[in-house]
Image (cartoon, helix red, strand yellow):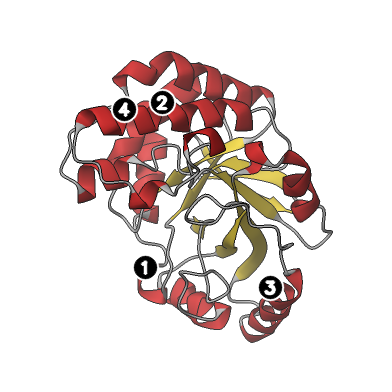
Amino acid sequence: MYLTDYHTHTRLSPDGEAPLTEMARAAVQAGLSELCVTDHYDLMQLDGTPFTEPYDWDPAVEQLREAQAAFQGRLTLRLGLELGSAPFFPDRAQAAVDRPEVDFVIGSLHNMTPEAGGGDFYYVDYKTPEICYACLDDYFGSMLRLAPMTCYDAMGHIIYPLRYMNLRSGQNVTLDRYQDQLREILRLVAQNGRSIEVNTYNGRTVADWKPVLELYREAGGELVTVGSDAHAPENVAKGVREAYALLADTGFRYVTVYEKRVPRPVRL
């Protein structure tokens, strides 16, 4: 089985810990065939202030070449980026990914809209369901704006806020009221030739993706990547095998990999 992890972070991310060589070593030990590093570039800071510095690709390219040399013949390595808040700064988002070295871009939303204060969803105190749903209203409104854009390849962690609402804060929030919005988002992703990712959150949220995958198939979606969202070597590939099984159970036949932003299906 050709196992892939297409959402990982190194020390080049503000919340990453290890160089790419250590992440690659963990990938080999976990039985992966391909690893894509997707360090963060968020166009908004944690407090919602715009981040205006361009992404520095040089260290990313340097550590990729070092790791490719060290693991040649044992692991395919790809250079990616997790791009945050693209709908709010579309020109800057497009400029960030217009580099020939880039293999893959995740389009993510970590922040609320500027109109809602722009703060990172991580820092919200989800003490009531009302607060949760207000944040989700904002989140999926932004995702509708992101879906038709061309600066990303995979729509990142669609169920992202639930990890803080339910797992951390003990709420029991569902996406039932967002089914129509999700259908439209997933239709646009599929129509646009983009993919969605099954983000396992280090193996903690695999089963939660089933209803999203079912909606995606109904919308005609076929391209899916799988990523652990690992920020440290010990979490590389966590939940990947389970995600492959879920994809197969939901009717998908392939997982998607990328080279120079061109998708390629790999049989599960």
The disc at residue 235 is: 1
Disc 3 marks a residue whose amino acid type is Ala
Disc 1 marks a residue whose amino acid type is Asn
Query: Vertical placement of 35 versus 186: above or below?
Result: below
**Secondary structure found at label 2:** helix
Q: Earlier in the sequence, mark 3 or mark 1?
A: 3
The disc at residue 137 is: 2
> Of tags 1 and 2, which is closer to the observer?
2
Residue 98 located left or right of residue 15: right
Disc 2 marks a residue whose amino acid type is Asp
Disc 2 to disc 4: CB gap under 8 Å: yes
Q: Which residue is mark 3?
A: 60
Q: Which residue is mark 4?
A: 133
**Secondary structure found at label 3:** helix
Disc 4 marks a residue whose amino acid type is Tyr
Q: Position of residue 162 (x, y in %)?
A: 31, 40
- Point 63% across, 81% down: residue: 67
Q: Position of residue 61 (x, y in %)?
A: 73, 73
Q: Earlier in the sequence, mark 1 or mark 2?
A: 2
Q: Nearer the viewer, residue 244 or 184?
A: 184
What whole-number distance in Å separates the C-alpha atoms at marks 2 and 3? 35 Å
Q: Position of residue 137 (x, y in %)?
A: 41, 25
Q: Position of residue 169 (x, y in %)?
A: 19, 46
Q: Earlier in the sequence, mark 4 or mark 1?
A: 4
What whole-number distance in Å separates the C-alpha atoms at marks 2 and 4? 6 Å
Q: Quadrant of residue 151?
A: top right
Q: Nearer the viewer, residue 114 or 139?
A: 114
